[in-house]
Image (cartoon, rainbow, N blue to C red):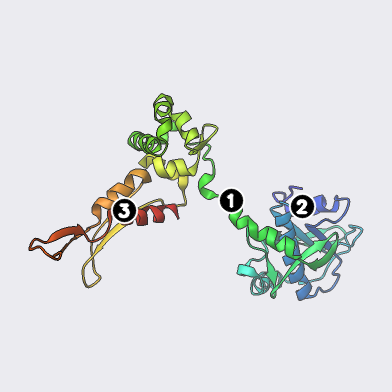
Amino acid sequence: MKIQHLDSASKLDALLALTAESEVVEFKEAKNSYDFSHLGKYFSALSNEANLNHHSVAWLVLGVNNQRQVVGSNYCRERHYLDRLKKGIADKTTSRITFINIHEVLHRDGRVLLFEIPAAPKGLPISFDGHYYGRESESLSSLNLEEIERIRAQATQEDWSAAIVPDAGLDDLDDEALRVARNNFKSKFPDKAVDVDAWDNATFLNKAKLSIKGKLTRTALILLGNNEAEHFLSPADVKIRWLLKDHQGNDRDYALFGLPMLLAVDKVYAKIRNLKYRYLPEGTLFPEEIDQYEPYAIREAVNNCLAH
């Protein structure tokens, strides 16, 4: 049921043509009034059901009876009252999510209101006044625990970095970063070193799980992409900022490092001052010098920032 791009009258016709109500469509007569709390409960229920049933929107229709006959509704005759409803719902829902739009249709048999309700965002079930609602067949009910957890689990199911970037290709990768990646791969898997040298770039990226069937992932672009490939990752701003402050906390110097991140880590490391620490071991007059911080610890911290 993809009717969200139709005009308001066509939306109504498409909804009336349905053989029955569903988890994402509800008809109410509401000839003269409609209780605000019921409006909010149905907003929560239809939003959650749209998410669970893989719809982008759900619909609450006032001025239509259960037989899908237009009977007309006088609910909120003035437009500014309808606009206030959007704020009223937002004040009582999770993350202030409210109607996408409220459509008025002057049907030949009466005025009809179409409340366009967004699907709950991935990982975020929508409550109204502190309670989660859903549908059981055509009835309003509490959203059960399994459904709540199913929505919440969506937050961990989608790996942004593993998504394919359809328009990106091998020309968008940095040659030096690819060379370093190959050497790192051989260091980690020495038994495959001879094979790696025989692989072309497409094969190597598949083997390293940076591409999927020859299609580059966002991870491939983050680690190996050339500077011009940054637009593929928009609106994410993939940069490392190095900042030098004096003893009073004032900024003294800074630098930005962009793609490819595999090379940027070494450039950032070169900027970090690792002062020498001198100490005098027992039994000698000659001090020894060591780095204040283990180089591994610094690199690990930068790599962790990049990974997260």
Q: How many marks?
A: 3
* Pointer 2 with pointer 1, Cβ within 8 A: no
Q: Earlier in the sequence, mark 2 or mark 1?
A: 2
Q: Does residue 38 appear in this view? A: yes
Q: Residue at x 50, y 41 (%)?
A: 217
State the residue position of label 2. Answer: 11
Q: Between residue 219 and residue 34, name the one nearer to us.
A: 219
| Badge 1: residue crowd in 10 Å (few <14, some 14–19, many ≥20) | few
Label 2: element kind: helix
| Residue 190, image x, y percentages | 40, 34
175 horizontally vs 93: left or right: left
Going by the picture, which residue comes out furthest to the top? 198
Q: Residue at x 84, y 69 (%)?
A: 30
Q: Does residue 121 appear in this view? A: no
| Residue 236, image x, y percentages | 45, 52
Q: Between residue 222 and residue 291, name the one nearer to us.
A: 291
Q: Is residue 245 above or below residue 211?
A: below
Q: Between residue 302 and residue 2, name the one nearer to us.
A: 302
Q: Between residue 156 and residue 32, name the one nearer to us.
A: 156
Q: Is residue 187 above or below residue 47?
A: above
Q: Earlier in the sequence, mark 1 or mark 3?
A: 1
State the residue position of label 3. Answer: 296
Q: Is residue 121 above or below residue 37?
A: above
30 horizontally vs 6: left or right: right
Q: CA distance from mark 2 to mark 1?
A: 32 Å
Residue 158's mark?
A: 1
* Pointer 1 with pointer 3, Cβ within 8 A: no
- Within the image, what quadrant is residue 125 found in? bottom right
Q: Amino acid at mark 2?
A: Lys
